[in-house]
Amino acid sequence: MRIFASLSLAGLMAASLTANSQTPAASQVALTPPMGWNSWNYFFEKVTDKNIRDSADQIVASGMKDAGYNYVNIDDTWEGERDANGVLHTNAKFPDMKALADYVHSKGLKIGIYSSPGPKTCAGYEGSLGHELQDAQLYASWGIDYLKYDLCSFIGDVLQKHAPNDKAEQMRIMKAAYEKMDKALKSTGRPIVFSFCQYGWDAVWEWGPEAGANLWRTTGDISPHWDRIYAIASQQAGLASYAGPGHWNDPDMLEVGNGKLSLAENRTHFSWWAMLAAPMLAGNDLSNMKPEIQAILTNRDVIAIDQDPLGKQASRVYSDGEVEVWSRPLVGGALAIAIVDVGDNRYATHPFHLNLAKLGLHGPQVGKDLWTGKPVTLTDGQPIEIASHDILLVRIASPK
Ligand code: GLA
C-alpha cells in the first residue's frame, strides 16, 4: 500500500511568497560544522518514520542534544513517486513528512532530508532532476532545515550522456546542477543547510562555497572499518585552508558505534573528525547505544574542538612512520594536538618521541588530555606510547 504525504498548499504559498529573497538567516547557517545524526550508516535503505522519531527522542534522552547535536537527517529511501503535477510524494515508510518534521521540531531539533540532482538517487528512488524548485518548495513547506544532495544517477544519465568525452564540460554541468538547487533553496527564504555529496570530484573544495555549499563530501563513502576511516582522514591533509565558518570539508558521517570498531578506533575517529572541523553526524543506532559509545559522542571537550568558533581545520604537521601528528589552531591562541598511531602494530622498544619544534613550540607545554580529562605536560623528545589505532588528544590553552 502506498500512503501519500499531504502537501500543504498553505506551506507552498508561504514558501513562494518569500521567494527570491535570501534572508540574512539563510546565509548564517553552519557557522560551525553541523552536528546531528543521519540515518544511512546504520539503517541504510530500511529507515522508517519511527526510526527517525526514535532517534530524535534518543538525541534528547542521551544528552546528545545538550552536547550540541541538533540535525536529525533522513538519508536516501524516503521518496515515493511524483503525481501528475510533478509533486513528489513520500513512500509508505514515511506516511506524513510534515507531521514528522513537526515532531522533530517539537523536540527542539532540526530535520534534514536527501535528494539527487539526477533522475534517481543512489538507492534508485526519485531524484530532483527537472523539479528542483518544486522540490525545494516542498521541503520548505514541510519545514526541512538541511538538504544532502547526492550526485548518483546524474553521472550516467546526464554527465555521460550530454558530454561523453569531455570531462571539463561534465564538471561544468555538475556545478550548474548544484547551483540550480542552491538557487531553488534560497528562493524559499528558509535557512536550509546545503550539503554537497559528489565524492570530492573536481576539487569541490575550490568551487563548492561559491556554488552554495555549506559542506561538501571530500571522498567516497565511509564504512565502519579502520582502514577506510584512516584513508579518508589521510585524504583531508592539505584541505585545511578551504574550511571556515559556513563552509566545511565533509569527510563523511560518523561510524562511531557501528560495525566492529574497537573503542580506541571509535575514539580516534571521533577525535580526528573534531580536529578536521568535520560535520559531526552520528550514524549509529541511538536506541541501542552502549554507554561507552555515548561517552565518546558526548565528550564536551572534544566537541568543543570541532565547534571551535575560529573554524580552522587541522593540518598534518609531520609523521614518523606509523605515528601522525596533527595540529589545529583554536580561538584565543589555543592549540589542539592529536598524535595518532595509525599502524596495526608497533613492535619496538623505542616509543614515538615528540618533536615540539616541528609543531612550532618551544619548551614544556601544559595542556589537557581530552580523553582522560587530566592535565599533561608535553616536553621535547618526550617518549609517548600510543596503542595501535589510538590517539592522544591534547588542548594547550597557551602554547609557547
Ligand atoms: C551515496 C552517499 C551515501 C548515502 C547513499 C544513499 O552512496 O555517498 O552517503 O547517502 O548514497 O543511497
Image: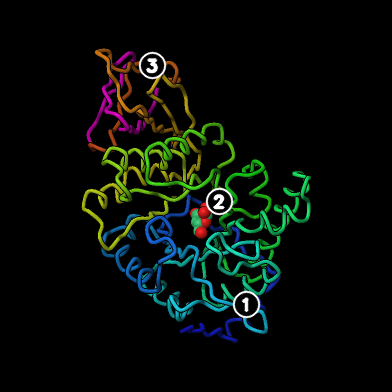
- Which amino acid does the dot numbered 3 rest on? Asn
Residue 215 marker: 2
* Dot 3 crowding, Cα within 10 Å, few <14, some 14–19, many 20+: some
Q: State the residue in front, 46 or 237.
A: 46
Q: In this rendering, is residue 274 above or below 74?
A: above
Is residue 161 a member of the stretch shown in magenta?
A: no
Residue 115 visible in the displayed image: yes
Q: In this rendering, is residue 168 above or below 368?
A: below
The C terminus, quarter of image: top left
- Which amino acid does the dot numbered 1 rest on? Ala
Q: Which residues are magenta?
A: 374-400
| Residue found 46% across the figure and 39% down from its top | 276
Q: State the residue in front, 217 or 206.
A: 217
Look at the numbered discs 3 and 1 and tell me whether their residues touch, using CB distance below 8 Å. no
Kindly identify which residue carries mark 3.
355
Q: Position of residue 345 (x, y in %)?
A: 30, 24
Residue 15 marker: 1
Q: Marks 2 and 3, how far apart in space? A: 34 Å
Q: Marks 1 and 2, how far apart in space? A: 24 Å
Q: Could you tell which of marks 3 and 1 lies nearer the N-terminus?
A: 1
Q: Secondary structure at mark 1?
A: helix
Q: Secondary structure at mark 2?
A: strand
